[in-house]
Amino acid sequence: MERPIVLVTGATGFLGGAVARRLLAEGWRVRATGRQAGAGAELAVEGIPFTACDLAESPDLLAELPAGCTHVVHCAALSSPWGRRRDFHQANVIATRNVIAACQATRVQRLVAISSPSVSFIYGSQQNIGEDAPWVDPAANYYIATKRIAERAVLTAGLPCVVLRPKALFGPGDTTLIPRVLKVAARGRFPLFGPDCLLDLTWIGDAVDAVLLALKADARCHGKVYHITSGAPLSRQLVLETLFAACGLQVRLRRLPLPVALALGSTLEGISRLTTMGRWEPPLTRYSVGALAYGQTLDISAARRDLGYAPLTDIPARLQACGLAWRKLHFPL
């Protein structure tokens, strides 16, 4: 029996790269695309054919990539708490529409699209929320607004698709979550807003498991959305203390009143828009304050039931491992 062929978009990113390598290890024939030529060259050396491609700017090239592919995993996105509207629209909306068109033209058997649970974000505590949690307008930032549009586009395209919303990905190769936290913590102080809360995290290996399960799931999963976490919410205090201790950082947790922090975030956002047209990323935004101040935990029972998703990751142990790796990189013996 001929092995299936899968195209992974955003394969030079954190999740996409992990998915592409895991699929290759499990016997799939993998093709990859992304915007980072250096990371793409590494994939090619490992046996994954790579095509450099901006999905928003190269629809003609993209139309050729899924030819012969039976499956597509769409990981490509611009994921950031701050940026310009146009950049998010191009990377998250136009790119997704182009991927959809390519999948429709080549009649792929399954599209797995990566969305985000931030589409349901509110400035308030959310515990064990389901995939049907309402979307509050206006969206907290351009990232959320464009991921909402992209998710709707996938679900209404008439394709055999599954949408996954992994929460707070971390692990080796992470360029967003832990690096941003440690960049602030390395100064010796870290701000805390409001009382302690529960946070959901997703180990990269669990997210990759979910993608593979979605690729293999039966047709009853078509057109459905699934929350993905490692299934073990932890207190914000425990997450930070575990990570900082493993990094060997002496960090003073500085409490800042939530209204003050939100006001400061608004001020810094205004400065960025006025002085750099949004190109400068403020060290604090309203969304980044809200994401740390208000816990958001997800109900993953649908993924457990329909996909057979069963995460068993020891999150504190993984945080320690990430911290130790960071310490070894920055403070080698």
Image (spheres, grey):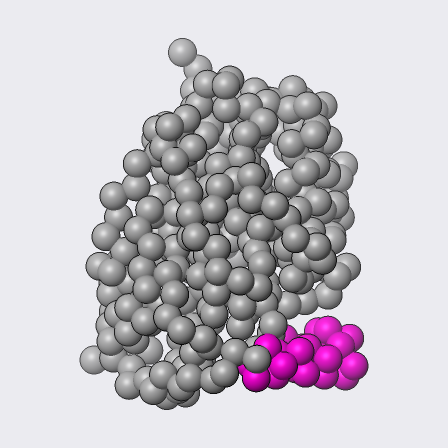
Q: Residue at x 56, y 44 (%)?
A: 133
Left or right: where does residue 162 sit relative to residue 195?
right
Q: Residue 187, percent across and down?
A: 41, 87
Q: State the predominant SS element of the stretch in magenta.
A: helix
Q: Is residue 196 above or below residue 260?
A: above
Q: Residue at x 74, y 52 (%)?
A: 90
Q: Residue 256, percent across and down?
A: 47, 84
**Along the line of sight, the residue nearer the viewer: 200 or 23:** 200
Q: Residue at x 77, y 83 (%)?
A: 275
Magenta residues, start to end: 260-282
**Along the line of sight, the residue nearer the viewer: 122 or 283:** 122
**Along the line of sight, the residue nearer the viewer: 45 or 180:** 180
Left or right: where does residue 199 sit relative to residue 123?
left
Q: Is residue 130 above or below residue 252?
A: above
Q: Residue 261, percent across and down?
A: 55, 81
Query: Does residue 106 belong to the magenta stretch?
Result: no
Left or right: where does residue 88 sit relative to residue 8?
right
Q: Residue at x 30, y 36 (%)?
A: 310
Q: On the rendered image, what quadrant is the N terminus found in? A: top left
